Amino acid sequence: HSEGDGLFAGVLPLRAAPEYRLLVEYDGDGGAGHESEIHDPYRFLPALGELDLHLIGEGRHEELWRALGAHPMTHQGVAGTRFTLWAPNARGVRVTGDFCYWDGTGFPMRSLGSSGVWELFLPGIGDGALYKFQITRPDGSHTLRADPMARRAETPPATASVVTGSRHVWQDAEWMARRGRRPVHESPFSVYEVHLPSWRPGLSYRQLAEQLPSYVADLGFTHVELMPLSEHPFGGSWGYQVTGFYAPTSRMGTPDDFRHLVDALHRAGIGVIMDWVPAHFPRDDWALAEFDGRPLYEPGDPSRAAHPDWGTLEFDYGRTEVRNFLVANAVYWCEEFHVDGLRVDAVASMLYLDYSREHGQWTPNEHGGRENLDAVAFLQEMNATVYRRCPGVVTIAEESTAWNGVTRATHHVGPGGFGGLGFGLKWNMGWMHDSLGYAAHEPVHRKYHHHEMTFSMVYAYSENYILPISHDEVVHGKRSLVSKMPGDWWQQRAGHRAYLGFMWAHPGKQLLFMGQEFAQGAEWSEAHGPDWWLLDPSYAAEPDHRGVRLLVRDLNTVYGATPALWERDTAPEGFAWVDGDAADDNVFAFLRFDAAGSPLLAVSNFSPVVRHDYRLGTPEPVDAWAEALNTDAARYGGGGVCHEEPLKAEPVPWHGRGTSVRLTLPPLATVWLRPV
């Protein structure tokens, strides 16, 4: 009888399928053909178990990548590859690839009942084979698709999937055991954001493993954040339009080469955060869009499916199998590649039904609200699953609205009636926007914008925050960080250094995009990456750039050694204003405290004048203060207005405190003082 799509089956009166082989004869020229003996793929029993199918059907298969996709294996004593695909609307599916001259006629797959899963074990196929699935749509037409679960893909612009198995032997056991011992929000956490293909263009994962760990460790960052590395067809999307959610991009090597890079970073003591993009996917006709002839990964309603900003499609978070595909994907990167964190892109576009949509272009949820309830449930499930399965992993939301409880536990219901989303940290987009706006003003105008630097403390403890100066702020006409600063070149660099000193002292974790650590003047370009030539000793202005890079190293070093700057990042008791109202002076002074109450005093002067005998109230019983860091130091390219000797606290009440100190504030600079 017909199994569909050209596959026929018959029943033989036998207790078990015999281990037979087929003798295949091909006609040759002149009638003399050649024979070959092969295993028949159809004599093998299905290589996927009932439990796998049950969990897939329920949308609860947390190791989905072990069940679906292409797996090299030995089955019934024969080496080959098991191919499995979820395509519930298909009338038939065939495996095709370079092993059959891309003619899928010979390899129709079996349908495994109501699960929507198709399966076939192909003997003799192994690592490196190229393949795709030829799907017969409900209307009888055909479409050729890459594997949604492919763990390796061809290098773009080629689009085939690649059979792959891992042989990497991890050497980071010590790192993996240690990384979760202290909660992230009570730990030093400073992040160097990297677009890997352009950090040093042309380098492979293995070559990067020889250079990136030592560079980041020398600068003192605790983590790198890699912009998306899941396979994507268009390099200009920087990885944010993903077609291969389970495949590290092959532009720089194999999946095992990427494992080698993560391993090298871990051995250098550096955590790895990866950008993850579950908000949308591109419409390429060989990828996920209308995968089996009907909307499958996207909602059936075209107005719901279309992402209004990027010409892409949104996922159908209400469909259990789609949610499973994404939740398992988050777990996959953490378990298969030892990733220490996932920074989830564009969370706001997932949370709101009316995101970037006009009135009449969206339908309210069942309660009449604008929240996407399915997306909320998906994010809660993803976070809960990752935190349960992967100790020490942190999830980070790029979320630009005032949604309540992004970093609240999923079981704690907030005022809006929702449990928390369950993220560990959230990017503070408000702080980034306000502080960059302040810094861009001429100093003479800054007194009218003083609140832009202090407002962040009004809501600083509503979430667990990261302060991000990311790639988004230094592209597309926004200018690099140093170029945002007003004034001449000296003032721009001084403003850049003062801003970084303020940022590293402000409650929250730090994130800085590559190139900004040495005050690159030009915007980032993914085509040629950072302007490394600025650090070439033969370049006349090289000391200017090396000075800023030295400051970033010292910021990280002092930060890491000063618990007051990170131990109580999320506790109001860890912060106190000394003077938050010195608008006319362009001065901000505040205290940070560690868990034992030991303080650090941070003072930023965002005016281009030296302020002599500047009195600030100080907490008792500290008798004397010494400079821990001064962004105006000569070695950073500053004017050298520093306090060589400790400053004695005087019994003069000031700013509501019993004692005070008199400082000389350098121009456009941040000074950190700690008790002697």
Image: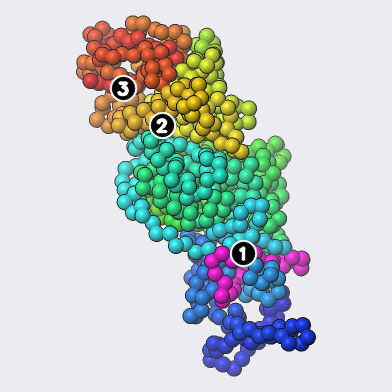
For the residues labelled 2 and 3, the Cα–Cα distance comes to: 20 Å
Viewer-proximal residue among 199 and 239: 199
Q: Residues within 10 Å of mark 2 (few under 14, many from 20)?
A: many
- Tag 2 residue: 508
Q: Report the quarter where the N terminus lies.
A: bottom right
**Amino acid, disc 1:** Leu
The earlier-in-sequence mark between 2 and 3 is 2
For the residues labelled 1 and 3, the Cα–Cα distance comes to: 58 Å
Q: Would residue 159 be visible to someone looking at this image?
A: yes
Residue 115 in magenta stretch = yes
**Amino acid, disc 2:** Gly
The earlier-in-sequence mark between 1 and 2 is 1
Q: How is the image coloured?
A: rainbow
Q: Residue drawn at (54%, 69%), measured in percent from left and top?
A: 126
Mark 1 vs mark 3: give the one in front. Answer: 1
Mark 1 vs mark 2: give the one in front. Answer: 1
Q: Residue drawn at (36%, 52%), measured in percent from left and top?
A: 172
Q: Residues within 10 Å of mark 3 (few under 14, many from 20)?
A: some
- Tag 3 residue: 628
Q: How many marks?
A: 3
Find the magenta span and give its range. 113-142
